Image (cartoon, rainbow, N blue to C red):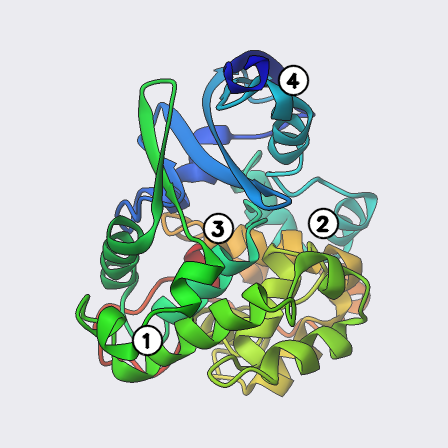
């Protein structure tokens, strides 16, 4: 019975981390009931083997000394929850510090949004459902239909007076297209969610398997599932596996990179990869700086010095303000590109 008792503990994180700014991704597009942030409480679930554990966090401390006060659903899983909390915010690296010294665009965005960190999506099914739901629609609608999926077919968890839902791959795999279509998903998205759930339920896709593969092998494994494309695979590489990968097919990322490095021209995915190749091992953090919807003009790129231009020969910038890396989501459901990476 001891394992059923909740556990409360404190996790000190390496700063700087602007916890509220980083977690705002879970609120600004609506509450999907899966990753919940109301400005005070972060409530999520963690899969440990075949069991799912809920946990709730409150932010304390300062930007340079952030602390999360955590309540885990079961004391027996405290260590697993603590590890999840510690790895939730993408860590700063020396490679990112080096990039800030050589790329004035990233340097100024980093200065403007000090402490902002991309938030990881450690649950593979939840991450894939997030990608599928956000294809070709605005993010508020994607959040709305995800919340319907969670409340209709998910499992509720209660911790610290909060409620959060988890998605079970076996249950979703057993649904029909009509079951999910009734929630106002399209037929194709309903099919793709079922396909993703079946791949996870059968072991065809798993975090453990994907983690052992190269980037190209991960992309091949994911895109072998009908409905999951390269864009989804690159997003999983960056935000679930923590790889330094740019989501080059994302419309917002394409716009941002074009404005920052290509004289405002809309680049193809291949051109995005070429223009951001110098991001290297810092790609996930560099791209993360574009996730702030309120980023606004980060700098006047015309101020870039000739020395900096030489150091960043790939980075052809213009004299426009770098609203460039302030990636924005599409505003209408008819938009034919994806922007989940930009805000999720």
Which numbered disc, 1 or 3, marks the residue that appears first in the sequence?
A: 1
Which numbered disc, 2 or 1, marks the residue that appears first in the sequence?
A: 2
- Residue 203, compared with residue 42, is above or below; it is below
Residue at left 41%, top 73%? 194
Dot 4: element: strand
Mark 3 sits on what residue? 298
Residue at left 81%, top 71%? 214
Choose between 224 and 325: the one closer to the eye.
Answer: 224
Residue 100 image label: 2
Dot 2: element: helix
Choose between 99 and 281: the one closer to the eye.
Answer: 281
Mark 4 sits on what residue? 12
- Side of 140 where 55 appears, left or right: right
Residue at left 59%, top 49%? 122
Residue at left 41%, top 78%? 192
Dot 3: element: loop
Distance between mark 2 and mark 4 Cα atoms = 26 Å
Label 4–label 1 contact, CB within 8 A: no
Label 4–label 3 contact, CB within 8 A: no
Residue 190 image label: 1
Could you say which quadrant of the image residue 248 lies in?
bottom right
- Residue 333, compared with residue 324, is above or below; it is below
Residue 157 image label: none
Residue 43 in the image, given as x and y percentages of width and height = 41, 32
Q: Mark 4 or mark 1: which is in front?
A: 1
Dot 1: element: helix
Residue 246 in the image, given as x and y percentages of width and height = 63, 68
């Amino acid at each position: 019975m001891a394992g059923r008792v909740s556990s409360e503990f404190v996790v000190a994180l390496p700063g700087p981390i602007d916890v509220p700014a980083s977690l705002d991704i879970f609120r600004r597009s609506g509450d999907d009931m899966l990753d919940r942030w109301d400005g005070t409480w972060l409530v999520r679930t963690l899969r440990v083997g075949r069991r799912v554990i809920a946990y709730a966090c409150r932010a304390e401390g300062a930007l340079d000394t952030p602390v999360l006060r955590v309540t885990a659903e079961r004391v027996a899983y405290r260590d697993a929850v603590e590890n999840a909390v510690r790895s939730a915010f993408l860590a700063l690296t020396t490679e990112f510090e080096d990039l800030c010294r050589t790329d004035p665009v990233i340097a100024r965005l980093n200065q403007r949004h000090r402490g902002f960190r991309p938030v990881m999506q450690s649950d593979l099914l939840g991450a894939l459902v997030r990608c599928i739901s956000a294809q070709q629609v605005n993010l508020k609608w994607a959040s709305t239909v995800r919340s319907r999926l969670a409340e209709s077919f998910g499992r509720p968890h209660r911790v610290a007076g909060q409620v959060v839902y988890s998605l079970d791959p076996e249950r979703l795999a057993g649904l029909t297209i009509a079951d999910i279509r009734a929630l106002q998903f399209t037929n194709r998205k309903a099919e793709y969610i079922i396909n993703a759930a079946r791949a996870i339920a059968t072991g065809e896709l798993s975090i453990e398997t994907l983690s052992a593969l190269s980037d190209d092998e991960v992309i091949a494994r994911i895109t072998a599932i009908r409905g999951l494309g390269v864009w989804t695979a690159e997003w999983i590489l960056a935000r679930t596996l923590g790889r330094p990968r740019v989501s080059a097919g994302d419309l917002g990322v394409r716009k941002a990179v074009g404005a920052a490095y290509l004289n405002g021209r809309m680049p193809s995915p291949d051109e995005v990869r070429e223009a951001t190749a110098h991001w290297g091992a810092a790609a996930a953090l560099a791209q993360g700086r574009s996730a702030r919807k309120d980023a606004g003009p980060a700098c006047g790129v015309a101020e870039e010095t000739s020395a900096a231009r030489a150091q960043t020969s790939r980075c052809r910038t213009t004299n426009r303000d770098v609203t460039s890396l302030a990636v924005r989501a599409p505003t209408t459901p008819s938009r034919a590109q994806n922007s989940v990476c930009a805000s999720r």
